[in-house]
Amino acid sequence: MTNGVILQCFDWYMPSGRLWRDLAAQAADLAGAGFSAVWMPPCSKGAAGGMDVGYSAYDLFDLGEFDQKSSVATKYGTRAELLAAIAALQAHGLQAYADVAFNHMDGADDTEDVWAQAVSPGDRNRPLGDWHLIKAWTRFAFPGRAGRYSTMVWHWWCFDAVSYDQNDPTQPGEVIYRLRDKYFSTEVSHENGNYDYLMAADLDMGEPFVRGELDYWGDWFLGLTGVDGFRLDACKHIRSSFFPWWLGERRRKSGRELFSVGEYWSSAVEELRAYIAATGGALSLFDVPLHFRFREASVGGSSFDLRTVFDRALVALEPSRAVTFVDNHDTQPCQSLESWVEPWFKPLAYALILLRRDGYPCVFAGDYSPVDTHYQEGSRAVTLHSHRFLIDRLLTARRSHGHGDQHDYFDHPNTIGWIRTGDAGHPGAMAVVITNGTAGTKWMNTYHPGAQFRDATGHVAETIAADASGWAEFRCPDHSLSVWLQI
């Protein structure tokens, strides 16, 4: 999508019960701000019911309709509110992307006796003992739904591993139990010897019952909601042949593009490129390596060489398949993947994804809240600082001036800049300067002789004019940025 921008509309600790209603009410404002798509959290009922963020998937068919796991609504609202939110987004020209968590199921309704072998979490290819009977939470019957939409009951043979034995509940998580006649896929990350297993009851994507049900659910969900695409969770733990098949079926049957982005959590760009190759480019990936570069830059301050900020980033090597982001729900404070970008660097990072030519940028709700967000996890008090004022200005600049050729001036370790020259439909040029040190300047060719520029951020008050050859000297304050738009 040309100059599109995704909003991740949720964070891990947001209040329960209101997101779908808020989305419907905010759809017009989000479109007006410059967003083109909204990434919604998992829509289905999780193991913790109305308190579940959605990644502990329990019942994919319960979108907030049935009294299961102590609630009817999901954390985000009811099925009717979900459908109303999607309709509102699409009515205002926004695409709706649904988060799909297919790797595992959690919150089973009953246990089953099954033969299993313990393997080491650090090396899943190393057995820790002989085969023995365990009592695994693997029977999912969904009594609250009572067969509505699907009559399938899930049993142990739909899964390949678990990490909990009800017969021995004193040591949960210290071992992984590979189930009888099951093998970990080799089409996954090779971390820990094999990273097929992540958590809870791990789906066996080679099992025909599993693939058939997920295929059926995909048609049912897409037909009901009409979403425009998907965010696919935990891709590194799911065999790489699965999503090309599953997305291919959805696209073939619906006749729609269905943009999809996968979460393959690795800082090694080679792994991401290998996954893109293995899946034939069927889906984009989040640019996790770039996120870690932003994190490193924010911690390093002026010692970080800004010229290298895109080194080994996916957007630099596979720009058409990179979804760029600064932070998300997994990287925010108190999460297991916490790698929060320091607040002072957030505006610079957002300029680096929103005002450049390559990548499909995604803005995180935790950064876009209208006010600072506060939450408590145990004894830890956390504040997520709002960057909405500047993000809105960057979004406006992207829409009006983020067009045409791009010329980089990455020629100083602390102060870098670039030019967007504009195109026939958007003739105004844009000059961006960022610095992680003291106030900096950048002499750049705008390719617009005599043009005048004003800083959209408001950090610099005066107007700057290009000379007769199109060159001008642009500046920005300490540890900050300026965005100069042709007027």
Image (tube, grey):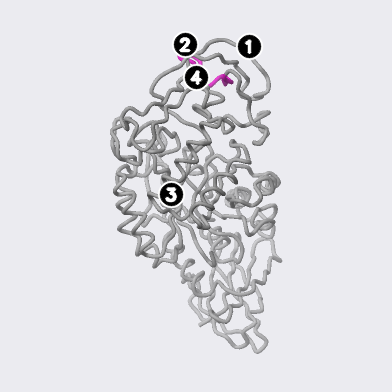
Relative depth, front residue between 365 and 227: 227
Separation of marks 3 and 2 at Cα, in angstroms = 40 Å
Instruction: Give the image location of residue 179, x and y in percent.
Output: 57, 19
Q: Which residue is mark 4?
A: 164
Where does residue 181 sit, x and y in percent of width and height?
Answer: 61, 20
Report the amino acid beneath label 1: Gly
Name the N-terminal-most of marks 3 and 2. Answer: 2
Q: Residue at x 39, y 62 (%)?
A: 30
Q: Amino acid at mark 4?
A: Tyr
Please give the name of the residue rendered at 41% of the width and 32% of the height, measured from the top-left corner: 58
User: Range of the magenta residues?
Assistant: 164-179
397 vs 414, nearest the viewer: 397
Q: Name the residue that disc number 1 marks.
A: 129
Q: Do labels 3 and 4 touch, CB within 8 Å?
A: no
Describe the element under mark 4 as helix, strand or loop: loop
- Mark 3 or 2: in front is 3
Q: CA distance from mark 4 to mark 1?
A: 15 Å
**Residue drawn 68% across and 23% down?**
125
